[in-house]
């Protein structure tokens, strides 16, 4: 297939032994190392070998489950995880170019704490930090904190009146949360630190600012205790499946991860996000829309399909996902990505079915194929994650000329 596409952005989503629940039982899996720094360092350095824009690291406030609403009691699948922000902080000094985007649940945590954690990650990585904000509706997660109650999701689901009220509340709260993060990251001006030995002044107090955020859900005075991050604003991302998270992406995020199942669906989703972006007054800003796909890759389509079928057999059920599942060759996946790119997607976040196999297929076969087509970079061309994504370093909202 001969094409001259615009270069696309590419990321991988790392979760345990892979996204298939039986991935930990594969011969090349490393289940005994899932809770070690070396395991995560090896995965991220492999992703960097493939020149990927960034990795995301999954996280939650409850054990993994085959059910969306609560624990399932299963003992034949991976359960337990390390903290995503701390994984990223450990890996940061051992990598040089790749972006690090841990997941953080914002429904039960405080924006002040997360702001300084992600700002610290940006300092440690010299400008490669981001965060994927995530909401929670699970009652078992709420019970860990005892500070609030959430109504159960009605049996009729999100489309019921009760479901609509609940999801609007959670995503409005997430929007306020991101606003607090961004204000706190700006609460130190870039040159607030003087470090003048002669005068004995370490900081210019006039360049630290109260943010004085007062909303329905948070009241945060500020300033942060952490100097402004190297990127000014670390990258904010969110996964979006429907109207409310589309609006969160459009109004508050730099990247939205979406789950189209074909080209027409991708075009509809991107159109909805762009319309919401315009309504939010951000029409002139870059907001990336990345398509999510779960991938099982091998030298032939038959081998990839057989491997997934084998995994399904071990799991006792066919694996399904919120995202489209691709089984095939790296070249076939390259064709699909370029087709979906024509629908307005600016990049893709691939979820490896198994680790390390499918990650290596991405870095060692998919990436070279895209490079041969002129569709992916051949070297890292920027030192920060914002730079890799073509995002400008924003001016500090509190600084005066």
Image: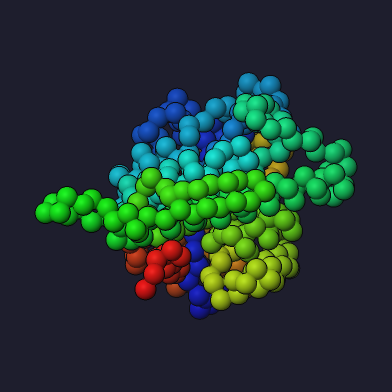
- Give the colouring mode of the picture: rainbow
Number of numbered labels in the structure image: 0
Residue 372, picture quadrant: bottom left
The residue nearer to you, when weighing 6 against 178, is: 178
Above or below residue 369? Residue 245 is above
Residue 316, compared with residue 272, is above or below; it is above
Residue at 87% x, 38% y is 155
| Image location (x, y in percent) of residue 22 | 60, 32
Residue closest to the far left: 198
Q: Is residue 52 left or right of residue 142?
A: left
Q: Of 187 and 282, which appears nearest the observer?
A: 187
Residue at left offset 56%, top offset 52%: 213
Residue 306 image offset from top left, x and y in percent: 63, 42
309 in relation to 80, above or below: below
Judge whether residue 267 can be spotted in this image. Answer: no
Q: Quadrant of the N terminus?
A: bottom right
| Quadrant (top left, top right, bottom left, bottom right) of the C terminus | bottom left
Residue at 49% of width from left, 44% of height from top? 112
Residue 120 in percent (x, y) is at 37, 46
Q: Position of residue 126 (x, y in %)?
A: 32, 53
Apparent side of residue 262 relative to residue 400 in the rendered image (left or right): right
Is 198 rendered above or below residue 315?
below
Q: From this viewpoint, is residue 88 visible?
A: yes
Quarter where residue 148 is shown: top right
Question: Residue at 38% across / 41% down in the picture?
Answer: 89
């Amino acid at each position: 297939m001969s094409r001259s596409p615009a270069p696309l952005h590419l990321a991988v989503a790392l979760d345990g032994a892979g996204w298939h629940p039986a991935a930990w039982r594969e011969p090349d899996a490393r289940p005994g190392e899932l809770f070690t720094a070396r395991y995560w360092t090896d995965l991220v350095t492999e992703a960097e070998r493939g020149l990927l824009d960034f990795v995301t690291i999954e996280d939650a406030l409850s054990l993994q489950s085959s059910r969306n609403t609560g624990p399932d009691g299963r003992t034949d699948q991976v359960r337990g995880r390390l903290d995503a922000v701390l994984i990223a902080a450990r890996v940061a000094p051992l990598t040089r170019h790749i972006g690090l985007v841990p997941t953080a649940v914002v429904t039960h945590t405080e924006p002040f704490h997360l702001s300084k954690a992600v700002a610290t990650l940006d300092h440690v990585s010299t400008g490669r930090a981001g965060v994927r904000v995530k909401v929670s509706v699970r009652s078992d997660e709420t019970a860990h904190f005892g500070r609030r109650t959430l109504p159960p999701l009605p049996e009729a689901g999100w489309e019921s009146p009760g479901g609509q009220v609940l999801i609007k509340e959670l995503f409005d709260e997430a929007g306020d949360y991101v606003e607090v993060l961004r204000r706190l990251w700006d609460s130190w001006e870039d040159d607030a630190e003087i470090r003048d030995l002669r005068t004995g002044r370490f900081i210019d107090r006039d360049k630290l600012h109260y943010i004085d955020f007062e909303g329905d859900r948070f009241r945060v005075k500020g300033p942060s205790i952490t100097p402004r991050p190297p990127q000014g604003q670390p990258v904010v991302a969110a996964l979006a499946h429907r109207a409310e998270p589309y609006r969160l992406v459009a109004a508050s995020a730099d990247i939205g991860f979406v789950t189209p199942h074909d080209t027409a669906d991708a075009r509809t989703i991107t159109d909805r996000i762009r319309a919401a972006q315009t309504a939010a007054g951000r029409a002139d800003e870059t907001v990336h829309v990345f398509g999510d796909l779960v991938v099982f890759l091998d030298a032939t389509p038959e081998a990839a399909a057989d491997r997934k079928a084998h995994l399904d057999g071990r799991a006792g059920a066919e694996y399904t996902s919120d995202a489209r599942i691709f089984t095939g060759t790296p070249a076939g996946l390259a064709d699909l990505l370029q087709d979906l790119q024509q629908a307005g997607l600016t990049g893709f976040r691939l979820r490896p079915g198994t680790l390390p196999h499918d990650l290596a297929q991405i870095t060692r076969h998919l990436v070279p194929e895209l490079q041969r087509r002129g569709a992916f970079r051949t070297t890292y061309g920027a030192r920060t994650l914002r730079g890799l994504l073509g995002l400008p370093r924003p001016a500090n909202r509190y600084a005066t000329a």
